Amino acid sequence: MTTATPLESAERIHADHTTVKHLGHWTEATAFDVRARRAGVVLDLRSPLIRWDEPVTVDLRLTGATVTLLLPEDVAVDQWGLAWSGRGRVKDAQGADTSTGRRLRLAGTARHGEVRVLRGGSAQLAAMCSRAYLDDLRRAHREGGFPTVDDPARERKN
C-alpha cells in the first residue's frame, strides 16, 4: 500500500490525546491534513468562504480517534480513498443530494477510528455545544450583531 504525500497547501490539524475543534469561519482551505491519535477532532466546513468548485479533500491518519465533519446539506462524501484497519466506519446518517456536484473526498488511513458526518440542524447543535459558541455569543452581544459559530453562512452584523 502506498501512502499519499501531504499537500503543501493543506490545512494541518494534529491532535494527540486531546480534543481539537475548528468552528465557524476558521479557514478558506480546500485541503486538510488531519493526524489524530486517541483524540477527537471537529472540523466545521460550512463556511461560505470555502470554495466547493472542486472536491474538498480531507487526508486522514487516525488511530483510535474520531473526526466529526460539519458539512453543508448538499455535499456528498466520497470515502473510497479511506483505508480501514480494525474497527471503524464513516457514519453519515443523512446522506446528501448529489445533484449539486459538491463533494468531500476522504483519503488516508483509519485504524480503530471513526468519521462522523453531520449536516443541517445536527451540525448546528454540535457547533452550539462548544466553548467557541459561548465566546461568539458574548462577542455578538457586546458588538450588537449575531453569532456565526452555529451558522457560518449568517452575516456577523445586522
Image (cartoon, rainbow, N blue to C red):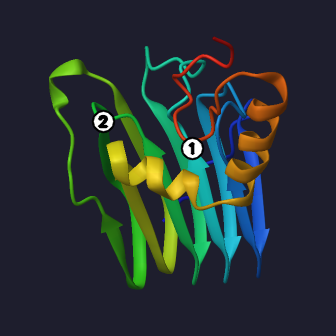
Q: Secondary structure at mark 2?
A: loop
Q: In this rendering, does residue 125 appear at all? A: yes
Q: Residue 60 appears at what percent x and percent y?
A: 57, 58
Q: Residue 142, image x and y in percent?
A: 84, 31
In the rendered image, which quarter is residue 55 located in?
Answer: top left
* Label 1 sits on residue: 44
Does the rendering let one see residue 3?
Answer: no
Q: Is residue 61 above or below residue 81?
A: below
User: To which quarter of the image does residue 37 belong?
Assistant: bottom right
Amino acid type, callout 2? Glu
Q: Position of residue 72 (x, y in %)?
A: 38, 34
Dots 2 and 1: beta carbons under 8 Å? no
Foreground: 65 or 158?
A: 158
Placement of 158 over or under 106, stated as above or below:
above
The reply, left or right, for residue 72 in relation to residue 149 is left
The numbered mark, 2 or 1, whose residue comes first in the sequence reads: 1
Figure label count? 2
Residue 3 position, x and y percent, is 58, 57
- Residue appearing at x 56%, y 53% in the figure: 128
| Within-10-Å neighbours for mark 1: few <14, some 14–19, many 20+ | many
Q: Identify the image quadrant of the C terminus.
A: top right
Label 2 packing within 10 angstroms: few (<14), some (14-19), many (20+): some
In the image shown, does 65 or 141 lie closer to the viewer?
141
- Identified by mark 1, the residue type is Asp
Viewer-closest of 101 and 137: 137
Q: CA distance from mark 2 to mark 1?
A: 13 Å
Please give the name of the residue rendered at 54% of the width and 22% of the height, measured from the top-left corner: 154
Circle number at residue 130: none
* Helix, strand or loop at mark 1: strand
Q: In this rendering, is residue 69 above or below 35?
A: above
The residue that label 2 is drawn on is 73
For the view shown, which residue lies furthest in the bottom direction? 86
